[in-house]
């Protein structure tokens, strides 16, 4: 199983299908389980960190016309510009995000932290210089987090959401603490639809205490995903 797959994605896995949107994992065979999402909003469909894959155009079309593409992590530009050109829309970046716009072959707009995209508020999650720039979207019911919490390889024990190993010693409590989402959508792996607020609270509250356990269980695997991300 590769940490990060490249090339065509002929058989994506559909995840997080609901009335307000849908997600897809372009390469289910990769460790990273990178996921893109389509969010149905009153302004149209917003594509979040999308990755191209077979059948995605039809999957998105079920939710309406695309209003825009948004990138929530400086490591998730992925195929954002290709989707923007395909749907004749712009790529929206968080106002403080650096090092991404220059690599996009599509018009770029900016949204301030606290600003709105189709009813979703842009939240700042974590920033470490130019290396880690992460933001989230939240509309009071659905929370979309690109990096800090997610897939099964980030979870230990009975966790349903796991904080990424690199964030466990400094979990993003300032950015995500106190939120009470009904559902969480993750940039890595399927999200959580049941008792999502409790799952998020547990993940943040126990991230540091469970770091040794997470390191033993997933350290090598997560090191591989980080190296793969940095190479791309």
Image (spheres, grey):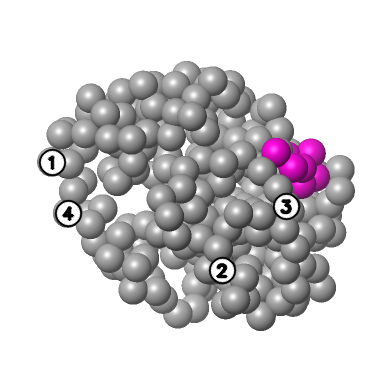
> On residue 63, which mark appears?
none
> On residue 220, which mark appears?
4
Residue range in magenta is: 114-120
* Quadrant hosting residue 16: top right
Q: Do the residues under discs 4 and 3 have CB atoms within 8 angstroms? A: no
Locate residue 37, reporting x and y percent.
62, 52
> On residue 100, which mark appears?
2
Q: In which quadrant of the rendered image does the C terminus lie?
A: bottom left
Locate residue 201, reporting x and y percent.
44, 21
Locate residue 85, reporting x and y percent.
74, 77
Secondary-structure class at tag 4 = helix
Which residue is at a point 26% across and 29% down the rendered structure image?
Answer: 208
Secondary-structure class at tag 3 = strand
Q: Do the residues under discs 1 and 2 have CB atoms within 8 angstroms? A: no
> On residue 111, which mark appears?
3
Residue 111 is left or right of residue 153, and the answer is right
The residue pinned by badge 1 equals 216
Secondary-structure class at tag 2 = loop
Residue 93 is left or right of residue 44, and the answer is left
- The residue lying toward the viewer, choosing from 15 and 144, is 144
Q: Is residue 52 visible?
A: no
């Amino acid at each position: 199983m590769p940490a990060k797959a490249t090339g065509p994605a002929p058989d994506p896995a559909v995840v997080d299908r609901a009335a307000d949107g849908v997600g897809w994992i372009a390469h289910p065979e990769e460790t990273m389980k990178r996921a893109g999402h389509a969010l149905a909003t009153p302004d149209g469909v917003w594509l979040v960190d999308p990755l191209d894959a077979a059948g995605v155009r039809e999957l998105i079309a079920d939710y309406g016309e695309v209003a825009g593409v948004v990138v929530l992590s400086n490591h998730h530009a992925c195929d954002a510009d290709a989707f923007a050109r395909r749907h004749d829309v712009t790529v929206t970046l968080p106002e403080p995000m650096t090092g991404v716009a220059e690599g996009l072959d599509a018009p770029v707009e900016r949204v301030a932290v606290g600003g709105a995209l189709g009813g979703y508020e842009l939240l700042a999650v974590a920033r470490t210089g130019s290396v880690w720039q992460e933001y989230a979207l939240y509309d009071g019911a659905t929370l979309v987090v690109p990096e800090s919490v997610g897939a099964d390889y980030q979870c230990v024990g009975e966790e349903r959401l796991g904080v990424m190993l690199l964030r466990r010693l400094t979990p993003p409590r300032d950015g995500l603490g106190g939120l009470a989402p009904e559902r969480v959508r993750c940039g890595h792996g399927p999200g959580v639809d049941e008792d999502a607020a409790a799952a998020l609270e547990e993940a943040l509250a126990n991230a540091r205490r469970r770091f040794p356990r997470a390191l033993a269980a997933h350290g090598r695997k997560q090191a591989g995903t980080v190296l793969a991300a940095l190479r791309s």
